[in-house]
Amino acid sequence: MKKNILTVVIMACTLINLVLTAVLVFTVMPAMQKTTNLIDKVASVIDLEIDTKDESEDYTIADLESFAIDYDAVQNINLLPEEGDDTMHVFRMKGLVVSFNMKAEDYATISEQVKADPTHVKDISIKTISSHTKSDFDQVKVASEIVKKLQELYNTKCIVELIFTEPFLA
């Protein structure tokens, strides 16, 4: 009699397992399928944004005009202190070179504005550089961050590149 009760309990557990598996397959799987489709759609939108080419980036090196902004003396820009580090770190540079896309519609006006008064370029550069610590300072990323800020300030895509003249991180 004990063997029959044990067999009935095992059979009941097997049937419960089968029912729960069926519930899982028919309720959770469609929800997972919908989630997968949503993720695929989001990923395809992101890929489209990455793949689309910005018209302002349609230039060659021959289309660039460089304008050098030299300082009277080497600029020492203090970086933010790092947590637990008492050492004062500085970024030194002798000047900046701003590159303009000569194919841009507003090239003439923007380049003349910057050449006439490069104060905004200097100010944004110093503020952006001084907002970084030594460990997170990457010249390429900082330069592109400055370019984005300059593009926003002048409301243009004419300014495409910024290069530090004689940079040194200490």
Image: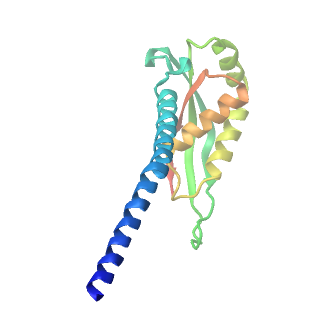
Side (left or right) of 1 relative to 57: left
The residue nearer to you, when weighing 131 against 90, is: 131
Quarter of the view holding residue 104: top right
| Residue 95, position as x, y percentages in the image | 58, 38
Q: Residue at x 48, y 36 (%)?
A: 43
Q: Quadrant of residue 21?
A: bottom left
79 vs 35, left or right, is right
- How far from the left and from the top, in percent, is residue 53? 49, 21
Q: Could you tell me if residue 19 is visible in this image?
A: yes
For residue 64, side relative to residue 2 (left or right) = right
Residue 28 screen position, x and y as percent: 48, 52
Residue 80 against residue 10 in the figure, above or below: above
Q: How many labels does the image show?
A: 0
| Residue at far left of view | 3
Can residue 166 be seen in the rendering of this structure? no
In the rendered image, the vertical position of residue 28 relative to residue 105, given as above or below: below
- Image quarter hosting the N terminus: bottom left
Above or below residue 158? Residue 2 is: below
